[in-house]
Image (tube, grey):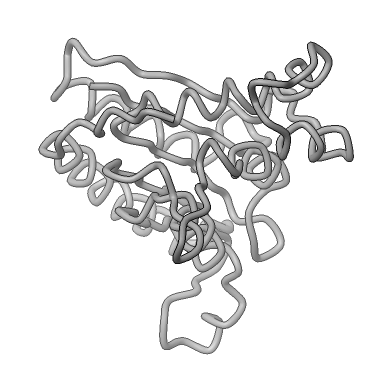
């Protein structure tokens, strides 16, 4: 079994990093021989999408020039990590009502026609099916469904849609809300820790991802 841990906070001791660390610790207890792949987006150089990147990504992979292969090398490495993982845990702090810039840059690199998305007779089909994803968020306020502030949540809806687009439909969100200084922060964080431990244990019961031939 392989677990891919993705951190995207700019802060070294952020709440989202604490959550992903606890998830990894719980997962390791259940999978002592399992492998954890760490991807820290705050320390990974993720270039912006350029004209050269687009031309390379939409070209025949068998006919890429050495320069084009180099352009796509980071994207290929990130996609390979996803393909290899059985479970993916993403630490996602809410910045300005949405995801962080490093997480968005990662998404831009891994949404690839021919690698994570295929075109079929009925439209697009995500390749990364059969994997479990747990998204652990930290938020300064509360954005629960049915509340007046729910309309400002541009984090979970976007992540659900884009992850589903590449075939990651088995997604669990666990939110540590109200993390701005105050008496509500600790109870919410404690509840998130409890939920993520249950999610980590549940991830161990899933079957390994099917082998993909692309």
Q: Residue furthest right?
A: 51
How far across and how far down the image is residue 207, in percent? 14, 36
Task: Indicate left or right for 51 with 27 as reference.
Answer: right
How far across and how far down the image is residue 208, in percent? 20, 31
Residue lying at 44% horizontally and 35% vertically, measured from the top left: 18
Task: Indicate left or right for 78 with 105 as reference.
Answer: left
Which quadrant would the C terminus be assigned to in this image? top left
In the depicted structure, whether residue 36 falls above or below residue 7: above
Q: Quadrant of residue 75?
A: top right
In the depicted structure, whether residue 141 falls above or below residue 117: below
Residue lying at 68% horizontally and 31% vertically, measured from the top left: 60
In the depicted structure, whether residue 201 falls above or below residue 99: above
How far across and how far down the image is residue 179, in percent? 52, 56
From the viewer's side, name the closer residue of 144 and 15.
144
From the viewer's side, name the closer residue of 22 and 158.
158
Q: Quadrant of residue 181?
A: bottom right
Residue lying at 77% horizontally and 31% vertically, measured from the top left: 56
Task: Indicate left or right for 111 with 143 as reference.
Answer: right
Q: Residue furthest left?
A: 205
Residue lying at 22% horizontally and 29% vertically, measured from the top left: 26
């Amino acid at each position: 079994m392989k677990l891919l841990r993705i951190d995207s906070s700019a802060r070294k001791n952020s709440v989202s990093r604490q959550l992903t660390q606890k998830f990894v610790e719980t997962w390791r207890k259940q999978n002592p021989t399992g492998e954890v792949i760490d991807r820290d987006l705050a320390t990974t150089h993720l270039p912006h999408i350029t004209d050269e990147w687009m031309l390379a990504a939409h070209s025949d992979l068998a006919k890429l020039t050495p320069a084009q292969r180099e352009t796509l090398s980071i994207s290929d490495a990130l996609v390979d990590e996803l393909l290899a993982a059985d479970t993916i845990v993403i630490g996602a702090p809410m910045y300005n009502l949405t995801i962080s810039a490093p997480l968005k840059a990662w998404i831009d690199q891994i949404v690839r026609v021919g690698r994570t998305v295929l075109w079929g007779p009925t439209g697009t089909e995500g390749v990364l099916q059969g994997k479990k994803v747990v998204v652990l968020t930290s938020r300064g306020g509360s954005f629960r469904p049915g509340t007046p502030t729910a309309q400002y949540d541009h984090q979970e809806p976007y992540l659900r849609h884009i992850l589903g687009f590449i075939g990651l439909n088995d997604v669990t969100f666990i939110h540590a809300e109200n993390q701005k200084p105050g008496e509500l922060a600790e109870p919410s964080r404690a509840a998130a820790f409890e939920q993520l431990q249950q999610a980590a244990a549940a991830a161990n019961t899933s079957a390994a991802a099917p082998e993909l031939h692309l």
